[in-house]
Amino acid sequence: GSPVIERLRQSTNPFTYDADRTNHRRPDGKAAIAAGLFERHGLSRGAYFPAHNSAGLRGALAFGGTREALNPREMAELNAVANLIFTEVVELRAGRRQNVSLSRREIECLSWASAGKTSVEMSEILGLSEYTVNHYLNRATRKLDAVNRVQAVAKAIRAGLLN
């Protein structure tokens, strides 16, 4: 009977809540109990952020407390943070962050990509063909479960594989 759960099911937009006003709309007659729980734990106001990842998994993060309502900029920033957190949690639960093993050449190519070099420039620096450079970058991208070389570089940096 939670109006929050119902709203999360129907929308992907973040929203704020006030425990008294939100629980007042409960159809199950438990408004006073729910509002009391929120109040007792210092969560009288807050915001919910529906989150999803590229695989279509959905979830939500909530931030609560007693402060005044969030302004639009804070909502936008917390929405971005919530989606990052959700993605990280999904990856941790899936075990994808454990022991990614890249070859020396894959790391070299990612390192040069992080410096802004193109495949042609990398091929000249490393003495490889452009095709071979792209092959190493594609393999590293797949191993890191990234969608492109930019995301692969970011994931490699987070995993401590690049400085």
Image (cartoon, rainbow, N blue to C red):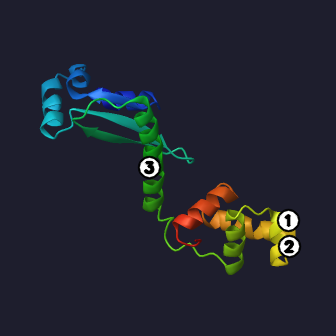
Q: Position of residue 119 (x, y in %)?
A: 81, 64
Question: Is the C-beta separation of discs 1 and 2 under 8 Å?
Answer: yes
Is residue 8 rendered to the left or right of residue 129?
Answer: left
Q: Position of residue 7 (x, y in %)?
A: 38, 27
Label 1, label 2: how far apart the Cα atoms are: 6 Å
Q: Secondary structure at mark 3?
A: helix
Label 1, label 3: how far apart the Cα atoms are: 36 Å
Q: Position of residue 140 (x, y in %)?
A: 67, 68
The amino acid marked with disc number 1 is Val
Front in this rendered view, residue 160 or 117: 117
Is residue 48 rendered to the left or right of residue 110?
Answer: left
User: Which residue occupies 35% across, 32% down?
Assistant: 70
Q: Which mark is residue 49?
A: none
User: Which residue occupies 31% across, 29% down?
Assistant: 69
Tell me the mark number nearer the camera, choosing from 2 and 3.
2
Label 2, label 3: how far apart the Cα atoms are: 40 Å
The amino acid marked with disc number 3 is Phe
Tell me the mark number nearer the camera, choosing from 1 and 3.
1
Front in this rendered view, residue 147 or 75: 75
What count of labels does the image hold? Answer: 3
Q: Which residue is mark 3?
A: 86
Q: Which residue is mark 1?
A: 120
Is residue 100 rendered to the left or right of residue 107?
Answer: left
Q: Which residue is mark 2?
A: 124
The amino acid marked with disc number 2 is Glu
User: Which residue occupies 52% across, 46% down?
Assistant: 53
Q: Secondary structure at mark 2?
A: helix
| Crowd around label 3: few <14 · some 14–19 · many ≥20 (10 Å) | many
Is residue 11 rendered to the left or right of residue 70?
Answer: right
Q: Earlier in the sequence, mark 2 or mark 3?
A: 3
